[in-house]
Image (cartoon, rainbow, N blue to C red):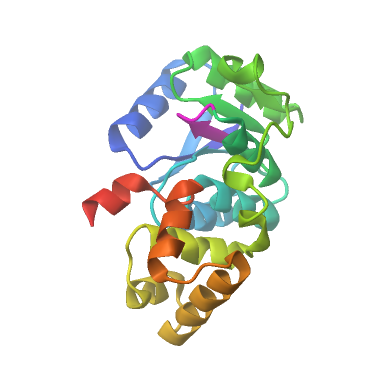
Amino acid sequence: MASLLLVEDHTLFRAGVRALIERSGSGHLVVGEAAEGHTAARLAKELAPDVVMLDLSMPRLNGIEAARLITKENPHVRVIMLSMHSDPGYINAAFDAGASAYVLKDAAFSELEAAIRSVLAGNKYLSQGVRATTALNGRAHPGPSGPDLGKLSSRERQVLQLIGEANSSAEIATTLALSVRTVETYRQNMMNKLDLHSAAALTSFAIKHGVCSVETMDRK
């Protein structure tokens, strides 16, 4: 039996996964839920779950950066990334960030159960839908974890996501508990590192590299 933290910004999907787990007879217990990465990182520290099931595409802090924070602060926690993306770049980024499993959202529930068993045993798990084209921890192509994005620090990537989601510097400062001046410094540093020359170019970069939640952008 394992304690689970379920992190997913779509309420109906989150409720569905929880219901399936509770009805499965596995004995696993969902000890907490979250809808975005910052809350997930806080709950992972407070609840100390065995496994965090983490949506890749979330507003404010995506699953990649959330996984990085969670596994750094809680080395014992195993992360299962849930995603609609079968692109090897996303898979590479998830494992690089500390995830132990990558499960496609359209997979059968039995795959999620298998992933939970696998990570609890200290192993990695890759969804069947991408095994044919992706080697575990392989480097198929740069994708969203490409060399340009690798130039940025974790905090810069957090700021980049919020920029890509059309947040103002003041909104970013509030979200990350920073000063507006610090946010502007991060923005300029990123432009320098990426050889970009306008805020619009920085936003385009975030979208192109899958850093931000397009759904959140659309709601702005």
Q: Is residue 34 left or right of residue 3?
A: left
Position in image of residue 84 (x %, y %): 45, 29
The quarter of the picture where residue 12 lies is top left
In the displayed structure, would residue 219 be above or below residue 131?
below
Q: Is residue 98 left or right of residue 129?
A: right
Q: Nearer the viewer, residue 96 or 55?
A: 96
Q: Is residue 162 visible?
A: no
Magenta stretch contains residue 174: no
Position in image of residue 46 (x %, y %): 55, 56
Which quarter of the figure is the N terminus placed in?
Answer: top right
Count of numbered circles in the view: 0
Magenta stretch contains residue 83: yes
Q: Is residue 165 visible?
A: yes
In the displayed structure, would residue 28 be above or below residue 9?
above
Q: Nearer the viewer, residue 219 or 39?
A: 219
Residue displayed at 46% across by 80% down: 184
Residue displayed at 41% across by 46% down: 58
Q: Nearer the viewer, residue 48 or 39?
A: 39
Q: Nearer the viewer, residue 148 or 159?
A: 148
Q: Which residues are magenta?
A: 80-86
Which quarter of the figure is the C terminus placed in?
Answer: bottom left
Position in image of residue 103 (x %, y %): 55, 26
Residue displayed at 25% across by 49% down: 218
- Name the outermost residue toward the left: 219
Residue displayed at 68% across by 52% down: 147
Position in image of residue 135 (x %, y %): 73, 24
The quarter of the picture where residue 198 lies is bottom left
